[in-house]
Amino acid sequence: MSAEPDYLPADALAEEEPKYLRRQKPVEVRKRKFGRKTWPLYRRVLAGGIAALAGGLLLYEAGHYFLFSPGVMLERADQIEIAGNRFVPRDAIVEKFSADMGRSVVRISLGERRKALESLPWVEQAGVQRVLPNRIRVEITERTPVAFLRTANELSLVDDCGMILERPVEGEFRFPVVSGINESVPRDVREQRMKLYVGFMKEIELARPGADDHVSEVDLSDGSDVRATLTGLGAAPGNSSPILVHFGDSDFSNRYHLLAENVDQWRASAGRVDSVDLRFARQVVVNPEGKTMEANASQSAPQRAPAARKRR
């Protein structure tokens, strides 16, 4: 048996191979620019662009209208609505908007006008709002006076923060008169003294209802001593004479209670009570001012109230 040859003839190999290699033609892939699936996207983009353009034009027209149209201009004082003012004159409020006349209400600085209004003495708080198309609304919270203030020439009013107020032409007030503070006293000092006065009036009213009706004047010149002039104290006849009382700066309720319970006894013992000093812990000094003046002439000691009760 003969062995197979290790090689094949060249002709045999040539027959199995192709005579030539055919060049393959590339397949062209065409992209559809406006296919059915892409149309919704383009429509949304186009609609968004049109909406943005229309919105921009509308915004421009609205801005131009609210800034320059005659229909939004503040031109007359009656376009300013005011509420809450009783003692602040309307003209004083309108005057704060004088620089805004002929301007659009949109261009008015509400914060600046609020500060300008709160600079008026009677105004405690102010609110300013735009009412489109062409009005302004102002709401005023006025200060509440708590006492008359004795000044050099006349009586003014003062609130619990020490703000000195001019007395209005209209309006009736029934307050005690305070003295010892004026415009030359720093504002924080005036406020501290008036807080002391308000606390004094509240405490004596708690001690005895109606006690504030007996207070005619309060001297606040000394921040450590409320000196009040009271009338109508006691049940004895002839008790209408005024009494100057030193209350100190605290414990007003107990000190007033001590005064009201013992004033008749002190009158019976001293004959006449012009002043009382309640600042001491375990004693009451009656007529200290009068006896001090008398001591300069007769060297007599000040009279002390007998059987002065301890404060509760």
Image (tube, rainbow, N blue to C red):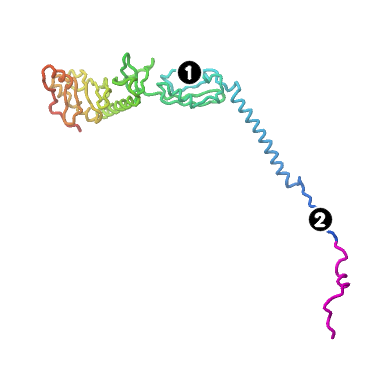
The quarter of the image holding the C terminus is top left
**In the foreground, 222 or 198:** 222
Task: Place residue 52 in its image quadrant.
Answer: top right
1 or 2: tag closer to the N-terminus: 2
Amino acid carrying mark 1 in the image: Glu
Task: Place residue 140 in its image quadrant.
Answer: top left
Amino acid carrying mark 2 in the image: Pro
Q: Residue 12, image x and y in percent?
A: 87, 73
Membership of 11 in magenta stretch: yes
Membership of 137 in magenta stretch: no
**In the foreground, 113 or 22:** 22
Q: Check disc 1 and report its element: helix, strand or loop.
A: helix
The disc at residue 95 is 1
Q: Residue at x 87, y 70 (%)?
A: 14
Task: Place residue 152 in its image quadrant.
Answer: top left
Distance from disc 1 to disc 2, alpha carbons, whole Å, reads 88 Å
The quarter of the image holding the N terminus is bottom right
> Which range is magenta?
1-21
Q: Residue 146, image x and y in percent?
A: 33, 23
Q: Residue 157, image x and y in percent?
A: 34, 19
Residue sticking out furthest to the top = 153
The answer to whether marks 1 and 2 mark residues whose Cβ atoms lie closer than 8 Å is no
Q: Residue 288, image x and y in percent?
A: 17, 22
The disc at residue 26 is 2
